[in-house]
Image: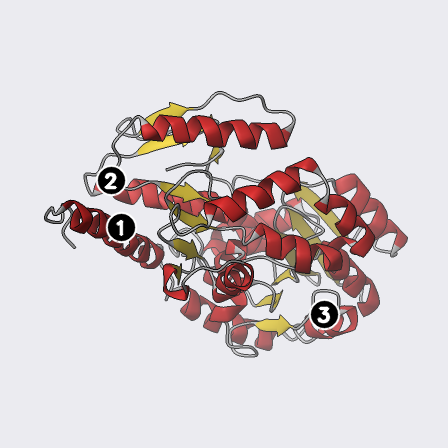
């Protein structure tokens, strides 16, 4: 497994952790090749740290790729699996989407065309584009695993890759950890901590990268509602001071709470009435699936790959564009009715149950078998890992 960072925060990182645990449980040998390998891990997992300077980030990426590839050339691995980016030759799980797609089609909407042009010229983005162009070459990358069709199409649009080599494996969710039963355990206490009264309607936003995830339009929609019952809870790392000032300018004083990163998001799902993530782009926001498993009605945009598993109006609500403030406000207001919230939330739970972590893990293991089988055919050997 190859990545700059190995930790357990975020959808991509959580997916990698589940995959590693599955491989270890199945008796395989797993090496983690990375710069920062954090958290308590099974002692059977071999850690192969790569030393690089942390700043500037573009140099860290360049040196990591060179040193990781040199390490891998000196070893004999059956499968090399890049997490998030194509750092070295091998399978790639593109959890964050094509960087070229992001720069060309998402960034101008998120931060404006002028700033997008400036950012494209920054060393980091130029390095990441070069890395992507090289890494997605067929001779270096046998398979790409995308976590949604939105993600897959963004890759195929810009790179001449055989479509059958880009496969979709939707993210999964731990439906035992994120479940409606959490309300009985956490709701009353957490709502008290957040200062929510019995009549308040709490909208929960969970994610890092507040601008890209659509926090701006969500604040504007909340202000447009003009209903003081609606409160917003923001979970995740970000420059909360800037966004708190924006909320104040919109007249939302006392109605928006920034709680930062939390180790127990399930308690916040339990405290909320609605989950909203009107993102400008997210290949598959796993918080959407966590909220659904928790029994919450979810609001997101069609630019969230997780919207592909939704049936709009049945188990969730989907807005066409993140910056459609009027449409977003109307969608939020439609969930003021507790009976409608309950109906959609119950169906959202049933949909989430169809996406356990075993599904993407099995799809990934099928890719491994294809890679190993191709190597064995070239070498004239019998397959070493049976299905």
Q: Is residue 261 visible?
A: no
Left or right: residue 332 compared with residue 222: left
Residue matched to label 2: 78
Q: Are marks 2 and 1 in contact (CB under 8 Å)?
A: yes
Q: Earlier in the sequence, mark 1 or mark 3?
A: 3
Residue matched to label 1: 371
Label 3 crowd (10 A; few <14 / some 14-19 / many >=20): many
Residue ranking furthest to the bottom:
313
Secondary structure of the residue carrying tag 3 is: helix
Where residue 265 sits: x, y (%)?
A: 54, 47
Secondary structure of the residue carrying tag 2 is: loop
Q: Is residue 62 visible?
A: yes
| Image quadrant occupied by the N terminus | top left
Secondary structure of the residue carrying tag 1 is: helix
Residue ranking furthest to the left:
382
**Above or below, comparing residue 80 to residue 267 in the picture:** above
Where residue 226 sits: x, y (%)?
A: 84, 67
Give the residue drawn at x 65%, y 27%: 56
Labelled disc at residue 304: none
Give the residue drawn at x 47%, y 51%: 94
Q: CA distance from mark 2 to mark 1?
A: 8 Å
**Above or below, comparing residue 191 to residue 40 in the picture:** below
Q: Quadrant of residue 167?
A: bottom left
Q: Earlier in the sequence, mark 3 or mark 2?
A: 2
| Image quadrant occupied by the C terminus | bottom left
**Above or below, comparing residue 366 to residue 2 in the picture:** below
Where residue 18 sits: x, y (%)?
A: 36, 45
Where residue 131 sits: x, y (%)?
A: 53, 42
Residue matched to label 3: 328
Q: Nearer the viewer, mark 1 or mark 3?
A: 1
């Amino acid at each position: 497994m190859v990545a700059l960072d190995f930790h357990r925060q975020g959808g991509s990182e959580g997916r990698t952790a589940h995959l590693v645990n599955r491989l270890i449980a199945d008796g395989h040998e797993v090496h983690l090749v990375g710069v920062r390998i954090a958290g308590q891990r099974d002692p059977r997992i071999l850690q192969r740290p790569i030393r690089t300077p942390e700043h500037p980030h573009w140099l860290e990426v360049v040196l990591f790729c060179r040193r990781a590839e040199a390490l891998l050339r000196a070893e004999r691995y059956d499968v090399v699996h890049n997490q998030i980016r194509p750092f070295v030759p091998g399978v790639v799980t593109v959890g964050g989407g094509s960087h070229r797609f992001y720069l060309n089609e998402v960034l101008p909407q998120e931060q404006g065309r002028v700033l997008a042009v400036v950012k494209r010229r920054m060393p980091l983005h130029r390095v990441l584009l070069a890395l992507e162009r090289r890494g997605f070459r067929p001779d270096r990358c046998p398979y790409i695993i995308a976590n949604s069709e939105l993600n897959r199409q963004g890759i195929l649009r810009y790179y001449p890759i055989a479509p059958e080599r880009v496969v979709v494996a939707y993210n999964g969710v731990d439906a035992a950890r994120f479940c409606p039963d959490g309300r009985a355990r956490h709701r009353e206490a957490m709502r008290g901590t957040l200062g929510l009264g019995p009549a308040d309607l709490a909208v929960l936003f969970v994610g890092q990268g507040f601008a890209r995830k659509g926090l701006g339009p969500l604040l504007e929609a909340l202000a447009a509602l003009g209903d003081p019952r609606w409160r917003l809870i923001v979970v995740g790392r970000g420059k909360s001071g800037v966004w708190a000032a924006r909320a104040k300018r919109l007249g939302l004083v006392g109605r928006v709470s920034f709680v930062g990163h939390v180790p127990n998001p399930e308690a916040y799902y339990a405290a909320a009435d609605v989950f909203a993530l009107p993102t400008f782009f997210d290949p598959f926001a796993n918080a959407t699936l966590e909220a659904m498993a928790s029994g919450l009605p979810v609001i997101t945009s069609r630019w969230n790959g997780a919207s592909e598993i939704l049936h709009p109006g049945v188990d969730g609500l989907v807005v066409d564009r993140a910056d459609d403030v009027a449409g977003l406000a109307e969608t939020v207001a439609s969930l003021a009715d507790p009976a409608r919230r309950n109906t959609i939330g119950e169906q959202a739970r049933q949909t989430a149950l169809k996406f356990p972590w075993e599904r993407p893990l099995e799809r990934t293991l099928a890719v491994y078998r294809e890679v190993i089988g191709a190597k064995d055919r070239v070498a004239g050997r019998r397959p070493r890992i049976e299905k």
